[in-house]
Image: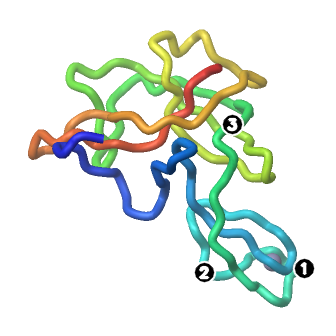
Amino acid sequence: MSGDSIVSAEGLFADTIDGPRLLGSICASCKTPYFPRSPGCHHPDCDLSKMEDASFCPRGTIWSVSIQNYPPPPPVVCDDPFQPFAVGMVDLPEGLRVLGRIATDDPDSVGPGDAVELILAPLGKDESGSEVISWQFRPV
Ligand SMILES: [Zn+2]
């Protein structure tokens, strides 16, 4: 990442030596995963709620996808001029579903069941002109 880049939110992801990872929590008692991090476990059958930091597998499968055809309101950052983009719910092997932009020039080309991998990429520029970096899922 360059010096001009800012991240979309602190603590949601990390750029590790093995590549980008989403950061969350796993309950050590019942193994329920959470993204983003959760201070407590919300599983109805879990009494202990012993939370541990976790990072999740960077590969997943698209569960559902839709196309964003108009610019979403702030704080979402988009390219100007606006280009429609795909947004997917992605199943990760740990058993959680994560929302993210799908990194493709052809939003109609992706669909449920497609394999994707996590990347960090610019979403656009904020008001001060700095690139905003966030996670996206790229078809593989
Ligand atoms: Zn639990």
What SS does tag 2 mark?
Answer: loop
**Could you tell me which quadrant the C terminus lies in?**
top right
Give the mark nearest the N terminus, 2 or 1. Answer: 2
Residue wearing tag 1: 45
Residue kind at label 3, given as amino acid type: Arg
Whole-Å distance between the Cαs marked 3 and 2? 25 Å
Name the one closer to the observer, 108 or 10. 10
Residue at left 72%, top 69%? 26
Residue wearing tag 2: 39
Residue 73 image point, x, y percent: 31, 43
Give the mark nearest the N terminus, 1 or 3. Answer: 1
Of all residues, the one furthest to the left in this rendering is 128
Residue kind at label 1, given as amino acid type: Asp
The answer to whether residue 80 is left or right of residue 18 is: left
Give the mark toward the camera: 3 or 2.
3
Residue 67 image point, x, y percent: 52, 23
Label placed on residue 59: 3
Whole-Å distance between the Cαs marked 1 and 3? 29 Å
Looking at the rendering, the quadrant in which ligand 1 lies is bottom right
Whole-Å distance between the Cαs marked 2 and 1? 17 Å
Residue at left 76%, top 75%? 27
